[in-house]
Image (cartoon, rainbow, N blue to C red):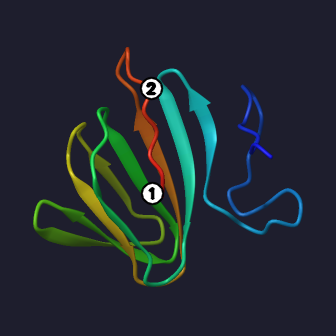
Amino acid sequence: MALKHATSGEVVNLLQTSGSLGLISQALVSAPRLELMRLVLPAGKLVPRHAVTGPITIFCHQGNLEVQVDADWQPMDANDLMYLDGDVGHALRALSDAIVLVTIFRPPGTHASVDT
């Protein structure tokens, strides 16, 4: 069953789920120029190094994580936000159970999505 994406004007609660699946990582919005994803990362989860074409933001909604940019690991706590230019390689590591909101801005002509 495909997960439902939010529609224009729809309110989405980042901590609420529909059905009995529990809180899961999912693309909340998928539009030609924008993708918004909720990542649910259990403590210890590593999202390997990757890059996307457009600029992104990473918002730590709950928990603690580290983001690797170049060789440096930057800590992020709840309510911290990080901006990355397009094509910047990065990795994520959850230090505790974390909920992260990732926004990807897609340049015209790109349609790639990121899997976790």
Determine the residue positioned at 36% across, 42% down: 56
Q: Earlier in the sequence, mark 1 or mark 2?
A: 1
- The one nearer the camera, 85 or 50, is 50
User: Where does residue 34 sit, x and y in percent of width and height?
Assistant: 49, 30
The label nearer to you, 1 versus 2, is: 2
Amino acid type at image mark 1 = Phe
Q: Height in image: 47 above or below 27?
A: below
- How many marks the image carries: the answer is 2
Q: Height in image: 73 above or below 33?
A: below
Determine the residue positioned at 45% across, 57% down: 59
Instruction: Give the residue at the far front of this rendering.
Output: 1
Q: CA distance from mark 1 to mark 2?
A: 22 Å
User: Where does residue 13 sit, x and y in percent of width and height?
Assistant: 74, 53
Determine the residue positioned at 75% across, 28% down: 9
Secondary structure beneath label 2: loop
Asked if residue 98 lies left or right of residue 48, the reply is: right
**Mark 1 neighbour density, 10 Å: few (under 14) some (14–19) many (20 or more):** many
The quadrant holding residue 86 is top left
Instruction: Give the residue at the far right of this rendering.
Output: 19
Secondary structure beneath label 1: strand
User: Looking at the rendered structure, which numbered label has been put on residue 88?
Assistant: none
User: Looking at the rendered structure, which numbered label has been put on residue 59?
Assistant: 1
Determine the residue positioned at 13% across, 69% down: 72
- The one nearer the camera, 81 or 73, is 73
Asked if residue 70 lies left or right of residue 17, the reply is: left
User: Where does residue 79 sit, x and y in percent of width and height?
Assistant: 47, 65
Which residue in the structure is indicated by mark 2? 111
**Mark 2 neighbour density, 10 Å: few (under 14) some (14–19) many (20 or more):** some
Amino acid type at image mark 2 = His
